[in-house]
Image (cartoon, grey):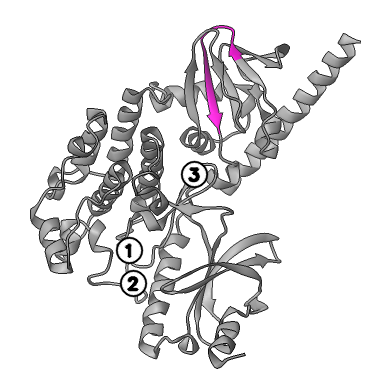
Amino acid sequence: MTDSADEQAAAEALPEFIAKYRITGIAGRGAMGVVYRGHDPFVDREVAIKVATGEGGGRSNRSLEVAKRLFFNEARSAGVLDHPNILRVFDAGEDSTGRPYMVMEFVEGSRTLRDHTTEGQLLPVPKVLEAVRQTADALVCAHAHGVIHRDIKPANLLLTPSGAVKVGDFGIAQRLQGDETQVLGWFGSPQYMSPEQARDDDLSPRSDVFSLGCVMYELLSGRRAFEARGLTALLNKLLNSDPLPLTELRPELPPAVTAVVDRCLRKDPAQRLPSAAALVTALDAAMKDLGSGVASLPEAEQLAVLRGLGWFAGFAPNDLREVLKAGRWQTVAQESTLEEACSLHIVLRGSLAVSLQGRRLYVAAAGESLGEVAYATGRARGLTLTALETAEVLTLSAPAREWASLACQMRFAQALGTALAERQWKTLEALAAAR
């Protein structure tokens, strides 16, 4: 074996443990180091462990200190945030060699939105709006806790197999309550910076709104809003030029969609959408305009509907809000069908007939759920769901662990277990009656 092969083999060798975490594989590599897949034996869960490359991996003492600041800034910034669309940080520290590590939520089979920024790989417009909405909702939480991300870009937005977005990489985040771990100065990705960030001015949450507008532009068009050869030319465009109108790149886009992007990309923060919450509202209006199934009822009325259903008995108000954010409120016209997929469908109003290969199995009325087995196992059974009258249904596709807080996960698991038991009992009764 050659010297270079020996070095490569050593680089690929897995440590057995990092702190208390058993290392089971490599999840990925990046400029800052390596991400291991690990197991936390105390709570019995899979985790991702990001470790900075040490001196042995070619990193100088000075750059290792910078890495430490970035790691610990991310841990303190993201560690205080509890939101289903923010990648959770569980722990951070230094290993026996002095390298910083950070322990995060592990998301199986995830990719980033960067995979959907080129022609031929673009997501459908409704899915783009949903992904941006989830990101904006995560920023509402971050901003409420005094955290400005400062590096919103497609590569920092994970997309799970079920379509949930996870905002990650808070390494250069700015916290209003700063401390010695905070990373200040001119940092970020120039293609997605707000003009005020490029000037190194004081930032507000509107800076993240601009960056997310850049992401939305790219997801819709397959090209960046600001591109140039060289950093100087790029910053000049960012500060002084508007991007090519989306209507020229994709004339078929609805005006309501392009208007949201335009309002995010205003140079003057005062002319921009004022907050991530305002962006969520604007996206909801655009999605309604697309007819993508978003409920037109105000949130207060939606919550009232959920509170009136036995399925949600025992859910706290915040739990119900989490369910609403994760779900899709749909109106199903009489005799129209609803795709089973691997989703959980909770009937809010009206009723739906459930059939298999043309044979009706049962009818679900308001307050009952459908698709519990497919949702729990990830395997659809080929059921046909038909509205017997105009019905309203709340559909949840992502597993609760991807969108719910721990308290909500516990209540949701209990409700789903009860629904599964009731469905099994009704199935047994139907089979007995058919004999």
- Residue found at x 49% / y 89%: 56
Mark 2 Cα shell of 10 Å, populated few (<14), some (14-19), many (≥20): many
User: Mark 2 — residue?
Assistant: 182
Q: CA distance from mark 2 to mark 1?
A: 7 Å
The image position of residue 182, as x and y in percent, is 33, 72
Q: Which residue is mark 1?
A: 175
Q: In this picture, is 70 found above or below 244?
A: below
The residues tagged by marks 2 and 3 sit, at their Cα atoms, a distance apart of 29 Å
The image quarter containing residue 354 is: top right
Residue 164, labelled with which disc? 3
User: Percent position (x, y) of residue 79?
Assistant: 47, 62
Q: 112 above or below 124?
A: below
Query: Where is residue 116 drawn, in percent x and y?
Result: 39, 48
Which amino acid is tagged 3? Ala
Q: Read off the magenta span.
A: 386-396
Q: Is 109 colored magenta in this rendering?
A: no
Do callouts 2 and 1 mark residues in contact (Cβ within 8 Å)?
yes
User: Which mark is first along the chain, 3 or 2?
Assistant: 3
Q: In the rendered structure, which amino acid carries the disc numbered 2?
A: Gln
Q: Residue furthest right?
A: 435
Counting from the top left corner in percent of width and height, residue 178 is at 32, 68
Magenta highlight: main SS: strand
CA separation, marks 3 and 1? 26 Å
Instruction: Look at the image and tell me in which quarter the N terminus lies.
Output: bottom right
- Magenta run includes residue 389: yes
- Say few, some or many: other residues with alpha carbon within 10 Å of mark 1 (under 14 / 14 to 19 / 20 or more): many
Neighbourhood count class around disc 3 (C-alpha, 10 Å): few under 14, some 14–19, many 20 upward: many
